[in-house]
Every structure is written in C-alpha cells, then in structure tokens.
Amino acid sequence: MASQPRINRNPYLCSLSTMESKHGGIRPAGKESAEEIGRRVRALRRLVPGGEEMEIGRLFQETAEYIEALEEKLGAMRALADHLHGLGKRKTKGKGKDF
C-alpha cells in the first residue's frame, strides 16, 4: 500500500514533492501558479530584513542565511534558558520550591 504524501496546511510552506491546491487536490510541485509563487516571494520579502529591495536570487540566498542566523540565536537562547533554569534549581534547593 503506497503512503499518501504529507500535506502542509501552511499556505507559505509545501513539501518538495507535492503541494495542496486551494480546492484540496494534490498536484506535483512545479505546477504552482505565478500568483502562488508571487505570494510566497512577497511573504519572504516581508520576513527577511532588507528583502523588499533585493533581486530574487539574492533574496533566496539571504533567506537561507537568515534562517541559519535565527537557528544559531535560538540555540544560544535555549542554552541560556537551560543554564538559568539550572541556577534556579540550585538556588531553591531545600526550600521546597522547584522550577
């Protein structure tokens, strides 16, 4: 039995192999209308700092770099939160409080 392709319901994201049409049908990637592609490019332009003025190739490159930078920041924030959480546990140990 063949597995069904996973459908991402976010209109700005799709799998590499398929996407869901507005009417619920599935069609191969690469068949998106110019309107759908334009909508996604406009969303990227709003999300990426300076994206509104970039040519499309540069926009895609900056998008990838921006995602990498955000992932690094998220990792640093998680590490800091874990560290602070650990400090809070040591500080309240024995006082009946736990974070």
Image: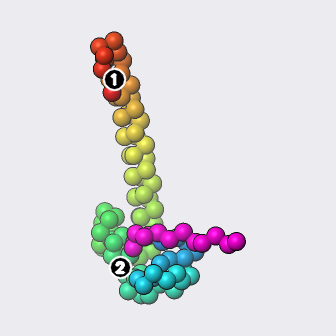
What's the residue at 29%, 69% (across, down)? Answer: 46
Judge whether residue 59 can be spotted in this image.
no
The rendered magenta stretch, by its main secondary structure, is classed as loop
Residue at image point 33% right, 76% down: 42
User: Label 2: which residue?
Assistant: 39
In the figure, 8 relative to 35: above or below? above
Query: Along the horizontal axis of the image, is 4 left or right of 74?
Result: right
Mark 2 neighbour density, 10 Å: few (under 14) some (14–19) many (20 or more): some
Does the stretch in magenta take in 93? no
Q: Nearer the viewer, mark 1 or mark 2?
A: 1
Near mark 1 (Cα within 10 A), the count class, few <14, some 14-19 or many ≥20, is few
- Residue at the image position 38 percent from the left and 46 percent from the top: 73
Q: Which of the 4 quarters of the picture holds residue 56?
A: bottom left
Pointer 1 residue: 98
Which range of residues does the magenta coloring cover? 1-13
Name the residue nearer the viewer: 15 or 74. Answer: 15
The chosen color scheme is: rainbow
Residue at 42% from the left image edge and 57% from the top image edge: 67
| Front-lying residue, 3 or 89 | 3
Q: Amino acid at mark 2?
A: Arg
Q: How many numbered discs sit on the rendered protein?
A: 2
Do we see residue 32 in this rendering? yes
- Label 1 to label 2: alpha-carbon separation: 47 Å
